[in-house]
Image (cartoon, grey):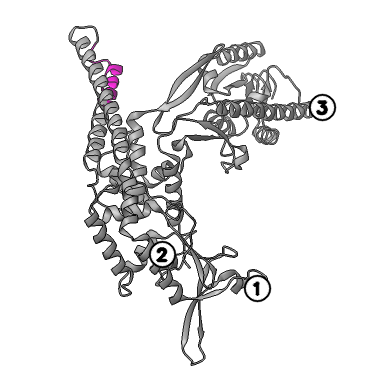
Amino acid sequence: MTDTARHAGVQTRAALYLRVSTGRQATNDLSIPDQRRQLEAYCEAKGWEAAVEYVEPGNTATDDRRPSFQSMIEAALIKPPAFDVIVVHSFSRFFRDQFQFEFYVRKLAKNGVRLVSITQELGDDPMSMMMRQIMSLFDEYQSRENAKHTLRAMKENARQGFWNGARPPIGYRIVAAEQRGSKIKKTLEIDPLQAEVIRTIYRWALTGDGERGPMGLKTIATRLNDQNIRTRDGGRWGISAVHQILTRSTYMGEHRFNTRDYLTKKPKPESDHAIMAVPPIVSKADYDAVRAHLTSRNPKWTPPRVSSGPNLLTGICFCGACGGAMTLRTGKGSAGGRYRYYACSTRARIGSTGCTGMSVPMDKLDDAVVAHLETRLLDPERLTLLMEQLLDRREEWADQRRGHVAEMRKRATEAEAKLNRLYEAIENGMLAPDDASLKGRVAELSSIRDQAQADAERISASVDRLAPTITAESLNRFATAARRKLHDRTSGYRRDHLRALTQRVEVISKTEARIIGSRTELLRTLASSDGGNYAAVGGVRGFEPRWRTRHDSNV
């Protein structure tokens, strides 16, 4: 094929391919119009017909995941092809990956379609082919270097607390922070309308809604949908969306940037992450507690036998020497009877070289743990002291929620005022009622007003459901009932209640064990036992050892 025609008397048909790398360039830059002008002038000088144009606004040339590019290739590979030559400003507009560049050039050539760069004109001889390959290799290297320097700048931007772009996480909105030269630096602030939804999800995951205990992912999603609480886009909630919120560190004040590889989508090591400080929506303690709770419910980490097996301490009993689990072992006594005991799994698997731990009769250790909980933890005076600390937090929690209510009502009032001004403008003939953009603005303001009013009512209701003050009489009733049921071997309460109060039992020696538990979990159990709503007094289901403050042991 010659430059003038593929066949005698037929003009060469050219496809113009125009590309810029970013959406901002496509919107504001003159590159696309300038490329078009130069390509059309080149075709006119050659006597070619500019038959079709393919524009790629804001797509990288490091891969072939480009809609216009794929449409062009598809048209070039049909038989006969829709055009004879593809014209680009430079080879880098076509591809910045040397291997894929050559792959597509050869694929096109097999169907009789050439690739021409107006700024890098080359022939078809071996020397020209080598030069083209060198140019494409250099383009790939330059692209990788640019990407490396850009990523480094974006990571530093994040470390300084500025937003790099993209859509913010739900619960936040982008605001201008400062201006540096011609660039406006932006950061994140809490969106009070959506932030309360995030707090609700965390509260349900930690303590429930007052009618039931801590909720799982599916239950939370169902509950949100049942209460007509929509996502930011007005859609329905799913398990993955709830899981993402409960595992995203942004909500406790640490937004992580550069966590995944752009091409492979594989997670990057934490050393590559850049942490951007943002206003927290939930506390770090709540975030850590939720993560620990999700991990404990994960079947990959917690075998079913640990949570549903018959043994009292299975899954929470550990060797004090090596930290390995103490597992059930059985044996025969001298009289031929069988006995059961907890033994260090490391020693059982490897031998004494792995651990010097010991074995302890099961009944002896079970009874010692129950006796310690009964005499030390369930003492009414001790429970009174712990509950007073919890109730002291009630007013602080209520004041914080009242502040959220005021903020929601202010937002609803502002949206209502804006709607009224729009209606007045329509009545006065200043705005056309059939304006499409006006209808969208009215719908947006109405949604903001309705959502803010609903959130304010929901938060007010949670404040009204504050837990009643627990009296000395109710504490005594709780302690008496708990002691009785801890000794009841015929029901499942004994095991479940012990696990609600005890996180870990470490066997130090044959006569000494250390019991580690959660004070907040004890308080949650205590509050719920009296019909109170533990969530309403600001408590959270914690997973850190707290009530064993002096690190004392059960001997």
Secondary element at tag 1: loop
Name the residue beneath numbered marker 3: 127
Q: Is residue 446 magenta-colored?
A: yes
User: Between 465 and 243, which is closer to the camera in this rendering?
Assistant: 465
Q: Does 259 sit above or below residue 516?
A: above
Q: Is residue 327 magenta-colored?
A: no
Magenta region, residue range: 432-448
Q: What residue lies at 44% left-to-right and 43% top-to-bottom?
A: 285
Quarter holding the N terminus is top right
Could you tell me if residue 78 is visible in this image?
Answer: no
Q: CA distance from mark 3 to mark 2?
A: 72 Å
Q: How many marks?
A: 3
User: Between 499 and 95, which is closer to the camera in this rendering?
Assistant: 499
- Crowd class of label 3 (few under 14; some 14 to 19; many from 20; radius 10 Å): few
In this image, 293 relative to 65: left or right?
A: left
Name the residue beneath numbered marker 2: 307
Give percent across and percent down for residue 6.
Answer: 65, 24
Q: Does 551 sit above or below residue 507?
A: above
Name the residue beneath numbered marker 1: 352
- Residue at the extreme right of the image, as rendered: 127
User: Between 177 and 239, which is closer to the camera in this rendering?
Assistant: 177
In this image, 175 relative to 73: left or right?
A: left
Secondary element at tag 3: helix
Give percent across and percent down for residue 182.
Answer: 55, 11
